[in-house]
Amino acid sequence: MSAEARPTTVAVGGQRRVPVPDAIAHDYLILALRLDQHTPGLVDGYFGPADLKAQADIEERRPAVRLADDAAALLDRIARDVPEPDRRGWLTAQVVALRTQAEALAGQPVPYIEHVARCFDWMPVRRDEAVFEAAAAEIDALLPGPAPLAERIASWDDRFTVPVGRLPDVLAWLVETFRARAAATFGLPAGEDLRVRFVTKQPWTGYNWYDGGRRSRFDLNTDLPTRVAELIHVAAHETYPGHHLEHVWKEAGLVEEQGRLEGSILLINTPECLVSEGLADLGHRFASPPADEPELLVELYDRAGLAVARDPTAARAAAMTSVALAGPRRRLSEARVNAALLRHADGRSNADVLTWLERAGRFAPAVAAKRLEFIEHPLWRTYVFVYHEGEALLRRWLEAAPESEGVARFGRLLREQLTPTAIAAELEAAAVPAALESRSATAS
């Protein structure tokens, strides 16, 4: 099925003025565009100078080994010629990722875990399986019954699945609600615009395609049933205050105002993804705070025409249980991290990992198969880490600040060039005075 909801705002007409890139940004853009010729899909979005895209499209494909050399030379120039520390750090991390991918294409691969660490400026961590068992125990207490837990989870989800025919209206209302909340909390650049579409036959649940000009498209994949609680999360993740809001603010501020044209290309399997996906996952707490989510769930049950909505008391109880389930279900979903390591680092077979996902992650067979499809996809085989690692890192960073500063700190993620290493450094710097203060208080 394919349908399109009304845009949440009117698109801006006329011609956009794209600033001329400096030499560093120029060479970063052309390097990425050339590498995309070898790895289609690496460039997730481009709204930079059209002549650079045309150049990459018509020239003879540059050998991967030369692209690796180009990346190494660009790293030297970035270290020497970029005076702004934040920009220099961001460009360095991005180009290390591009060089790593070019070297792999040139026949110089590194082990899977090291490849992931270089691509995302962050080392993935294998989860202790006890985490999954503890999460499953929490869910078991919330959804008691004699059937296997995976079946109980699937049965629960079936009760709150939005009929496909209702999805366009339900999602349009939800996105507009989140847009209004984001406008009040973080502000919106003038002329931003978002369109919603429904697609099938994709390895992901939802996707934001950023077109530039402060416009993007949000695709929702209907291959698997969409439950209400998941719809809240994916809408916040892909739209407001997630990917769409991040991209429009960075285009408005970094590209248009500061002239940092490297921001006019969005690249898969680079450090910006770990920050962007972590930001988008954390956006849920601002779009739908836990204290307010039961009310939103009840509203959506009604808009989706679910049977539970006929009894207000039952709807409220279901909503409260759904909120309680969110934490352990999120932890259980981190089984995907281990599944990727089992498949690509440990060399386990497809069948072994599928069975493991069903057992450890308590995924229904169809859901486990879709998750493994993503993990095995040539472009996405490393990408699974950015959600959980990014969310965990940024959650610690947000919670290290006073609650009153949470909105401002999240606003930095929307507007600044931040890397995982830079965020970790801020966390470490903040921990030192806290540790000294603790020691001083103990001594006194």
Image: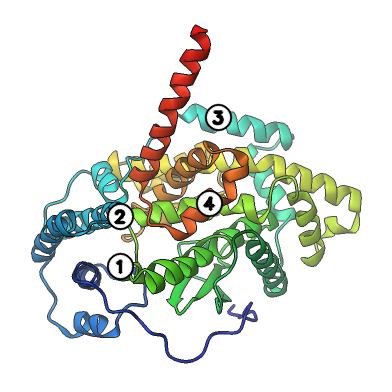
Q: Residue 41: in sight, yes or no?
A: no
Q: Amino acid at mark 2?
A: Trp
Q: Which residue is mark 1?
A: 262
Give whichever of discs 1 and 2 has the lower sequence position.
2
Residue 191 in the image: x percent, y percent? 55, 79
Q: Residue furthest toward the top? A: 443
Please say whether residue 371 is visible from this viewpoint: yes
Residue in view at x 64 percent, y 38 percent: 149
Residue, disc 2: 90
Residue position marked by numbered label 3 in the rendering: 133
Q: Specify the quadrant of the image occupied by residue 345.
A: top left
User: In 3D space, how far apart are the residues under numbered discs 3 and 2 (Cα atoms)?
Assistant: 38 Å
Crowd rating for badge 3 (residues with CA inside 10 Å; few <14, some 14–19, many 20+): some
- Quadrant location of the N terminus in the rendered image: bottom right
Q: Which numbered circle lies on residue 410? A: 4
Q: Residue at x 90, y 53 (%)?
A: 312
- In the rendered structure, which amino acid carries the disc numbered 4? Phe
Q: Are marks 1 and 2 in contact (CB under 8 Å)?
A: yes
Q: Label 1, secondary structure: give it.
A: helix
* Left or right: residue 423 compared with residue 21: right
